[in-house]
Image: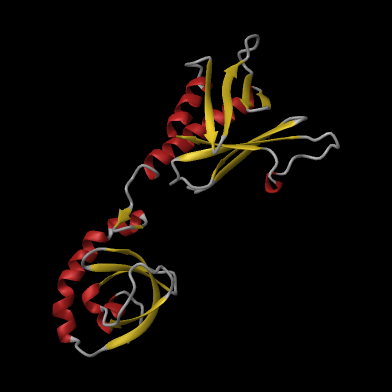
């Protein structure tokens, strides 16, 4: 399953692009460009064209039109002092053509384009409901679902760490990494090999800055490093 989606619908004079940067974002973008008089296309990178952001509620309403539960849906988008009207409307004379209007930009989608747009929006909405509406925060740091899943196991490791550290007292190693999350008993550290591991605070013998997400040097009990294959015997 991919994390990003992008699909463009181009005509002779207007282009419409659907874009989702991440399935964990509770929104997606519609980007519009048109052909200039000199025959070149507008460039969003040069500040040309129009981009709007649609939230989950708006995606649902657009789908209502695409699935022909509604004939038209329109709304206003506000950004700073600018308001942009958008609408999705079936053609009065042809029920297989859809008119999309975003500000001054208009794009007519034919049957196959409408069906592709409908399938993409339905797929992305399902992804976003699963990934963008789940709380993945521990402390004030966002963490992956895999690390959330392993959280309970690492809490048990944290409980046992004091006893283990006494057995291995004095055996520590320096290792570099960055803090990605925290609880009262453990830190989620991303080490240089791109491995994220929950490390019990009681096994960290050096000072650290929990608010700093850049790399730091940690002095950590060797037993926990060996347990997670971060160092070898």
* Res 76 seen here: yes
Residue 149: image x %, image y %?
Answer: 28, 56
216 over 127 or under it: above or below = below
Residue 3: image x %, image y %?
Answer: 49, 49
Residue at the farthest bottom position? 170
Q: Picture quarter containing residue 100?
A: top right
Color theme of the render: secondary structure
**Count of number-bearing discs:** 0
Question: Which residue appears at 35% of the width and 85% of the height?
Answer: 174
- Viewed as shown, does residue 83 lie left or right of 108? left
Question: Which residue appears at 51% of the width and 17% of the height?
Answer: 68
Q: Picture quarter containing residue 116?
A: top right
- Between residue 60 and residue 168, name the one nearer to us: 60
- Between residue 209 and residue 111, name the one nearer to us: 209
Question: Which residue appears at 30% of the width and 80% of the height?
Answer: 207
Question: Which residue appears at 49% of the width and 16% of the height?
Answer: 70
Residue 38: image x %, image y %?
Answer: 86, 37
- Viewed as shown, does residue 19 lie left or right of 126? right
Q: Picture quarter containing residue 25?
A: top left
100 over 1 or under it: above or below = above
Residue 1: image x %, image y %?
Answer: 47, 47
192 over 219 or under it: above or below = above
């Amino acid at each position: 399953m991919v994390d990003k989606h992008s699909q463009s619908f181009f005509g002779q004079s207007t282009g419409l692009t659907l874009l989702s940067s991440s399935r964990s974002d509770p929104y997606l973008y519609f980007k519009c460009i048109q052909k200039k008089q000199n025959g070149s296309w507008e460039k969003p990178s040069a500040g040309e064209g129009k981009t709007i952001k649609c939230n989950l509620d708006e995606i649902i309403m657009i789908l209502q039109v695409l699935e022909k539960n509604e004939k038209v849906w329109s709304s206003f988008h506000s950004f700073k002092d600018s308001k942009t009207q958008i609408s999705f409307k079936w053609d009065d004379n042809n029920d297989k053509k859809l008119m999309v209007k975003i500000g001054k930009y208009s794009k007519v989608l034919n049957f196959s384009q409408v069906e592709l747009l409908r399938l993409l929006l339905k797929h992305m909405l399902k992804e976003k409901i699963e990934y963008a509406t789940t709380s993945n925060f521990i402390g004030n740091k966002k963490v992956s679902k895999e690390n959330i899943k392993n959280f309970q196991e690492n809490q048990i490791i944290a409980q046992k760490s004091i006893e283990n550290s006494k057995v291995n007292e004095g055996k520590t190693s320096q290792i570099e990494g960055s803090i990605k999350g925290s609880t009262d008993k453990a830190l989620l550290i991303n080490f240089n090999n791109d491995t994220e591991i929950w490390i019990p605070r009681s096994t960290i013998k050096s000072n650290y800055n929990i608010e700093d997400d850049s790399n730091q040097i940690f002095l950590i009990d060797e037993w926990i490093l060996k347990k997670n294959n971060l160092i070898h015997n």
